[in-house]
């Protein structure tokens, strides 16, 4: 896969992470709020103690987007690194954060939208190079 194709895969990875984040956030927001505006949802997502675990995924999405802007870093290196980090977060690698994995796995089993988004994320991850940890 050449550099341009790999950058395309990284963009797809970013979109897949956003779909997972949205699916997880939608379920979590149902648990802590009723019907609120988009601005209120954002405030709740960033400040509510029950949702702080999601900040790890939010930060990962932001970091990926920043890395994709770096023209001097090989896309394959970025892809391998993020594949490892994401797989440690959501599986199948050994978890880097037990609490995150526990909560994520619960939602993965309880929410069809999370399961669908997770399947899409796994499909993208499988196309990326793997780095050994």
Image (cartoon, rainbow, N blue to C red):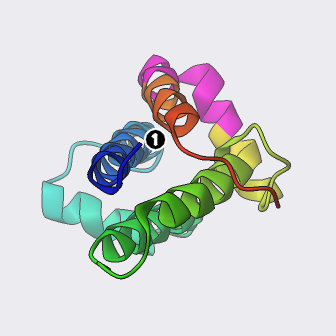
Q: Which residues are magenta?
A: 105-116
Q: Residue at x 80, y 56 (%)?
A: 132
Mark 1 crowdedness (10 Å alpha carbons): few <14, some 14-19, many ≥20: many
Name the quadrant of the N terminus. top left
Magenta segment's dominant SS is helix
Q: How far across and how far down the image is residue 30, in percent?
A: 39, 39
Query: Count the marks: how many?
Result: 1
Q: How far across and how far down the image is residue 126, in percent?
A: 57, 32
Q: Residue at x 82, y 55 (%)?
A: 98
Relative to 54, residue 55 above or below: below
Residue at which label 1 appears: 24
Q: How far across and how far down the image is residue 24, in percent?
A: 46, 41
Q: Is residue 113 magenta?
A: yes
| Residue 56 seen in this snapshot | yes
Residue in the foreground of this view, choosing between 97 and 120: 120
Q: Residue at x 41, y 23 (%)?
A: 113
Left or right, 85 with reference to 64? right
């Amino acid at each position: 896969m050449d550099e341009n194709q790999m950058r395309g895969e990284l963009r797809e990875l970013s979109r897949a992470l956003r779909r997972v984040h949205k699916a997880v956030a939608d379920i979590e927001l149902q648990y802590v709020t009723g019907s609120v505006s988009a601005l209120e949802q954002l405030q709740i997502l960033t400040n509510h103690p029950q949702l702080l675990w999601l900040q790890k995924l939010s930060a990962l999405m932001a970091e990926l987007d920043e890395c994709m802007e770096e023209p001097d870093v090989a896309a394959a290196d970025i892809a391998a690194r993020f594949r490892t980090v994401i797989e440690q977060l959501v599986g199948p690698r050994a978890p880097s954060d037990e609490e995150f994995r526990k909560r994520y796995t619960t939602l993965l089993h309880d929410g069809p939208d999370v399961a669908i988004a997770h399947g899409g994320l796994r499909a993208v991850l499988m196309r990326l190079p793997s780095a050994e940890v």
